[in-house]
């Protein structure tokens, strides 16, 4: 059996999951990991918090065809994924800014397991109203029809651009032999916690408080946790075609990150072209770009959950501030201390992995 599905027995979770809209959460253990090229002695992957709906697609992902010219991006959620997706897609597609504005990022760069991890998917009628926001780039199906990024990714013409948040054990077995280009992005845990909470409220209809969400994250009971293991496992992959990026480094030196990505993909552009790309990737520009900001999806969710008054709330936007230290304003001193203790408990300060979480 490739995957085991384990009910969450944590008493606080069981008592409050319904009121927070977490009833479909489950721990998933992957037993098919022998071919993962990871440099961790006696490595056994931990169970991962996912949706029960993953059972419908997990084996398909493990068995999927991988192509040599695929481009994969992997992150723990809210680590700069969308920002880096847009950067990668443009670098690999001749800086086609017009197409990047005209075609939604979800169509250019589908999120592999997305359809089964959203609990409030729009109905067929709603898909008509939000137009082309989530339709397949290749036109494989006519709307209205249930949104299915996995099917779209499997059938896309090459080169495919694929996004996932899954840890290494859950990725396709063929990835480790075909070895397409893979980009991994990490981010500071306190920034991730705040951004992930706001994302969960606006897109996953999470009903708990920031304090509740952060404590669930520290208990490894939010989607794709455990967080520290996610970063450590990818840092120990022996994968020759992988680029590792850090959100904070990208914020400090975006031009340097752009050049790094260009080198990885063997692309060359003029200084003027690179400056135009940096301008396109500015967070102020990204927030206004309807091809990446998921504005219509958020408006739909807020309407469905009786929160239309929050449509213009900055915290409800998919692309918020893109800051490296916004958590200092949004987290209480108690939560900051708790998150720091959590990281030290998982990764001692003298560990070689400590730098991943700074």
Image: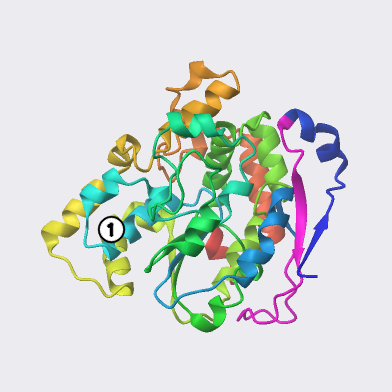
Determine if the magenta segment contains residue 138.
no
Name the one closer to the observer, 317 or 355: 317
Residue occupying image coordinates x 49% and y 20%: 310
Residue occupying image coordinates x 51% and y 80%: 239
Residue occupying image coordinates x 61% and y 33%: 332
Name the one closer to the observer, 296 or 166: 296
The coloring applied to the image is rainbow
Relative to 141, 336 lies left or right:
right
Whether residue 246 is visible to the viewer of this picture, yes or no, is yes
Q: Where is residue 333 in the image (x, y as percent from the top left)?
A: 61, 35
Determine if the magenta segment contains residue 39.
yes
Q: Kindly report the secondary structure that dominates the magenta region of the rendered protein.
A: loop
Mark 1 residue element: helix
In this figure, which residue is indicated by the disc labeled 1? 90
Q: Where is residue 6 in the image (x, y as percent from the top left)?
A: 83, 55
In this picture, is 141 found above or below 301? Answer: below
Relative to 207, 188 lies left or right:
left
Whether residue 349 is visible to the viewer of this picture, yes or no, is no
């Amino acid at each position: 059996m490739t995957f085991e599905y384990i009910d969450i027995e944590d008493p606080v979770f069981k008592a409050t999951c319904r009121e927070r809209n977490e009833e479909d959460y489950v721990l998933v253990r992957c037993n098919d990991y022998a071919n993962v090229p990871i440099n961790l002695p006696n490595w056994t992957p931990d169970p991962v918090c996912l949706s029960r709906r993953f059972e419908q697609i997990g084996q398909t992902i493990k068995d999927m065809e991988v192509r040599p010219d695929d481009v994969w991006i992997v992150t723990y959620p809210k680590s700069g994924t969308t920002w880096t997706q847009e950067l990668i897609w443009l670098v690999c597609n001749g800086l086609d800014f017009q197409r990047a504005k005209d075609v939604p990022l979800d169509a250019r760069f589908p999120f592999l397991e997305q359809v089964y991890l959203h609990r409030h998917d729009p109905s067929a009628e709603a898909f008509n109203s939000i137009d082309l926001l989530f339709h397949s780039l290749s036109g494989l199906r006519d709307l209205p029809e249930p949104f299915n990024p996995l099917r779209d990714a499997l059938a896309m013409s090459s080169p495919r651009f694929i996004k996932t948040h899954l840890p290494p054990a859950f990725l396709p077995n063929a990835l480790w032999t075909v070895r397409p280009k893979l980009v991994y992005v990490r981010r500071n845990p306190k920034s991730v916690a705040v951004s992930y909470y706001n994302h969960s409220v606006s897109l996953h209809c999470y009903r708990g408080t920031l304090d509740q969400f952060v404590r669930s994250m520290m208990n490894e009971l939010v989607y794709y946790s455990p967080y520290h293991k996610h970063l450590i496992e990818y840092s120990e992959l022996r994968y020759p075609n992988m680029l590792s990026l850090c959100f904070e480094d990208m914020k400090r030196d975006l031009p340097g990150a752009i050049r790094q990505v260009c080198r990885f993909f063997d692309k060359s552009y003029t200084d003027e072209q690179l400056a135009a790309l940096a301008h396109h990737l500015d967070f102020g520009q990204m927030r206004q770009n309807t091809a990446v900001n998921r504005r219509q999806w958020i408006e739909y969710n807020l309407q469905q959950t009786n929160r239309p008054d929050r449509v213009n709330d900055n915290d409800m936007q998919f692309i918020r501030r893109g800051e490296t230290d916004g958590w200092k304003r949004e987290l209480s001193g108690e939560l900051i201390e708790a998150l720091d203790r959590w990281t030290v408990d998982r990764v001692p300060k003298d560990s070689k992995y400590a730098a991943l979480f700074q």
